[in-house]
Amino acid sequence: LIKESFYFADLPGYGYAKVSKKNRAKFADFTIKYLTNRTNLMCVFVLIDSRIKAQKIDLEFMEFCGIKGIPFVMCFTKADKLKNKELEKNISDYINTMLESWESLPEIFITSSKSAAGKENIYSFISQTNVIFKK
């Protein structure tokens, strides 16, 4: 619960988590049910490690969100772990991969928990989104 106003829900990891296939399937089932049954869900923040190439599981998850009409944004994390040129190239490559099957992309944030990069942009986005919810 954030500022007695709205909730963040951190869903189980579906990609990196070192769990059995059975538990991974349970995570996937839970996540699908949660996302498709939340009438008050405003947006999903898809966290993407900016250091690695587009992963099939992430692309499939975002495609699922698109098909189901679940609003989402892409948050590239760990921006502080790369040099600017490398970060720009990785994100550009990811965007180009997405545009192979998407006409347009959702909003994109570049973030770092260490340097707080992107924090204010995300706060602003959340504030604007919450105003829409309250209407």
Image: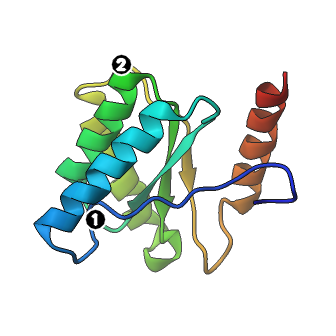
Q: Quadrant of residue 43?
A: top right
Closer to the camera in the image, 37 or 67: 37
- The amino acid sitting under disc 2 is Glu
Q: What is the CA distance from the residue labelled 1 to the residue labelled 2? A: 23 Å
Closer to the camera in the image, 57 or 121: 57
Closer to the camera in the image, 11 or 101: 11
Residue drawn at x 12%, y 65% as measured from the top left: 21
Left or right: 68 in relation to 100: right
Q: Which residue is mark 1?
A: 52
Q: Quadrant of residue 41?
A: top right
The C terminus sits in image quarter: top right
x and y percent of residue 1 in the render? 75, 60
Is 66 above or below relative to 118? above
Label located before the other in sequence (1 or 2): 1
* SS for dot 1: loop
Is residue 92 something that shows in the picture? no
Q: Residue furthest left?
A: 21
- The amino acid sitting under disc 1 is Ile
Q: Which residue is mark 2?
A: 103
* SS for dot 2: loop
Residue drawn at x 52%, y 31% as measured from the top left: 71
Left or right: 42 in relation to 2: left
Left or right: 107 in relation to 101: right
